[in-house]
Amino acid sequence: MEKFKVTVKLNCTAKDAFKGWLDNKIHSDYTGGASAKINAKEGGTFSAYDEYITGTNVEIFPYKKIVQKWRTSEFDASDADSLLEIQFTQKEDYTLVSLNHTNIPEGQGERYKKGWKEHYFTFMKKYYEN
């Protein structure tokens, strides 16, 4: 299994970034407009990026951390879910969002690391530029 950690600096509060992650419309904006359907409760299911990504919210610590079971349509049926921990760290005038992505099937980690940067972080930064 593979793992990695990536971080992005956003010009917003940790509360705003956290709430956006669990909001259908804002999460869709975080991906450049791909649809998102999110049940924002612990145990709630979600899909993102036009159902390419699916999973379950395992733990939610308001405005600080979200832990999700996470998979894409590229996982084999026999693959276990990967685990995604999203941390929201408030600094003086910005927020650091760190993704610790573990239990990724062999050979897929680098692609997902690149995907987070290109298909999420780019749009998240733009979303909070205004």
Image: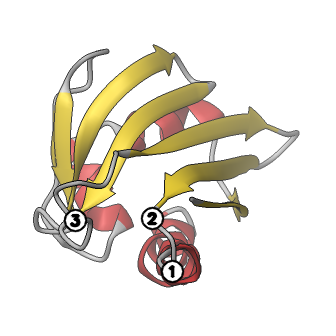
The colour scheme of the drawn protein is secondary structure
Point 48% across, 74% down: residue: 112
Q: Nearer the viewer, residue 1 or 66?
A: 1
Q: Earlier in the sequence, mark 3 or mark 1?
A: 3
State the image coordinates of residue 75 (x, y, percent, origin top left).
Answer: 26, 66
Point 46% across, 18% down: residue: 60
Q: Earlier in the sequence, mark 3 or mark 2?
A: 3
- Which residue is disc 2 drawn over? 105
Residue 107 badge: 1
Q: What amino acid is at disc 3?
A: Asp
Circles 3 and 1: CB distance less than 8 Å? no
**Any part of residue 96 in sight:** yes
Q: Nearer the viewer, residue 92 or 64?
A: 64
Quadrant of the rendering where the N terminus is positioned:
bottom right
Point 11% across, 62% down: residue: 51
**Any part of residue 17 in sight:** no
**Neighbours of disc 1 within 10 Å: few (<14), some (14-19), many (20+):** few
Helix, strand or loop at disc 1? loop
Q: Quadrant of residue 73?
A: bottom left
Q: What amino acid is at disc 1?
A: Gly
Distance of label 3 from label 1 (alpha carbons): 12 Å
- Which residue is disc 3 drawn over? 76
